Amino acid sequence: MSQHRLVNPLVRNIRALKRGALVRQAVRIEEEIKQGMKKPYNEVIDVSRDNPHATGMKPMSFSRQVIASCIYPELIDSDKMPLDVRERAKTLLECIGGSVGCYSDTIGIPIMRDSVSDFLTRRDEGVPSASGNIFITHGSDHGFGLLLTMLVRGDRSPLVGVLTPVPSQDFGNALVASGATAVPYYLDGQQGWRLHTEELQRALRSAREVCDPIALYVINPGDPTGHVQSRESMEEIIRFVYEEKLLLFANEDHQDILIGEGCMFISYKKVLAEMGSPFSDAVELASIHSASKGFMGEGGLHGGYLELVNFDPSVQIEFDRLISLLGLPIIGQLALEVMLNPLQPGEPSYEQYQEKWDWAEQLYGSWLTMALNLCVCRFGRLRITHVLVIFQEEEKLPDFFYCSRLLEQTGLCVCPGSDLGLPEGTYHIRLCIMTSVDTMEEVLRRLGKFHKQFMKDFS
């Protein structure tokens, strides 16, 4: 009997990403370099996804020192760590049972949930947050994945649908795996990736012909676009979900990375509260954040949270029951706590911590400017001539062809925009620019040289 027959059809429906083929190509190239094959470069640089520590970005010293002291408590009683590190580690250890080897509460250690609640209240300038509405997760995607598991029935007809932005990270596959349908709505790249309610209405009308849409998924700040929504746009979206009786899923994972002069992050929860009744009492909002993205970049530690607003208490009880099936790692929660409670002026490690934060912000802006000058950015359009139709005849999408050729000739691995659901005829690439100074300078050097020659060859 074939075991493949036993595989869940929902798993078989998951879309294979072109990035996977590029990663396999990169592995082959790295092996060839090890075997002594001559290349015009001596290493592969993979900036195809947000994985900054893998490309040279240094972690925040304070967070790693606190985590190290919790893992090896003897450091707390020595003078090898700054005083504020030792005090923070001692406090955290007392709250987690004295060892990182202890099991965690399934919805998160109480002090961690309190820390999230306090952080949200400070961030939203007094809008209250209750720890009872907070669930610690294995990172941001984990929270929405569990919500989908609870809300979606695979045998339901019609299928459940979620309005999903394009371009975006591969949230669509998470929907498919849960038995839901991803309903695409398109951000306006000509207007800074703005989200128009007219486009949402179009998507909703088309969705209702094939499924039962229950939620709208938004990403603010945008990933991979980097755009930041205005208050006006957020209010329009809140009115839309209120009128259409949709849940609102807000991915706010990149809230500490703001691109563009004058950009300011405002949470959906704050806007919702300030809009007042009937919106603030009725719109069901689920929002996520984590230590995996942004300047922490601790993707491997998997520490995040999910906050539910205006959800029925009986639903939260069921969600609590579902999340209790999975254990939570302690170390990810420690990273999350340090992110939510940063050092304050006067603490011994504050000056070094703040200098590194300011340095990272300045570099991020300068890297973006340099990338834009090369016609590509964190998620930039490829201005390529009509001859790219040749690549389609070879059954290769133009942006994938570009990425594959870029990787072969320069050792630079980036992500083709076609992986992110873009409409036919629009070609982009995506690269993570949260990395070390030396790495990003080398990335931009290779990319600029290749792009110039590519345009010459195919124009």
Image (cartoon, rainbow, N blue to C red):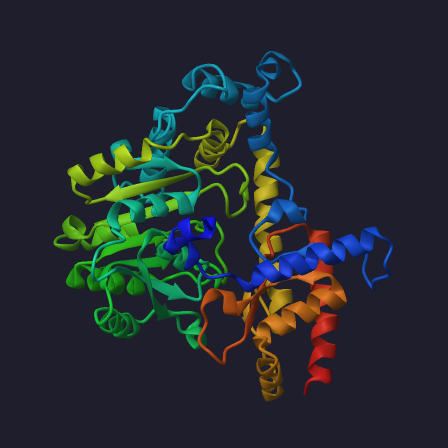
On screen, residue 286 above or below 305: below
Residue 264 in sight here: no
Between 298 and 204, the one lying in front of the other is 204
Image x and y of residue 25, in percent:
68, 60
Between 135 and 150, the one lying in front of the other is 150
Instruction: Say which quarter of the image contains residue 401.
Output: bottom right
Left/right placement of residue 173 relative to residue 130 reads right
Instruction: Say which quarter of the image contains residue 113.
Output: top left
- Looking at the image, the residue that sits furthest to the front is 1
On screen, residue 94 above or below 341: above
- Looking at the image, the residue that sits furthest to the left is 278
Image x and y of residue 357, in percent:
57, 44
Q: Residue at x 84, y 52 (%)?
A: 35
Instruction: Say which quarter of the image contains residue 350.
Output: top right
Quarter holding the C terminus is bottom right
Q: Residue at x 42, y 22 (%)?
A: 103
Left/right placement of residue 9 relative to residue 456 reads left
Left/right placement of residue 323 relative to residue 453 reads left
Image x and y of residue 363, in percent:
62, 54
On screen, residue 24 above or below 124: below
Residue 218 in sight here: yes
Image x and y of residue 266, in percent:
35, 53
Q: Residue at x 61, y 33 (%)?
A: 61
Q: Residue at x 26, y 44 (%)?
A: 150
On screen, residue 83 above or below 53: above
Between 30 and 97, the one lying in front of the other is 30
Q: How many marks?
A: 0
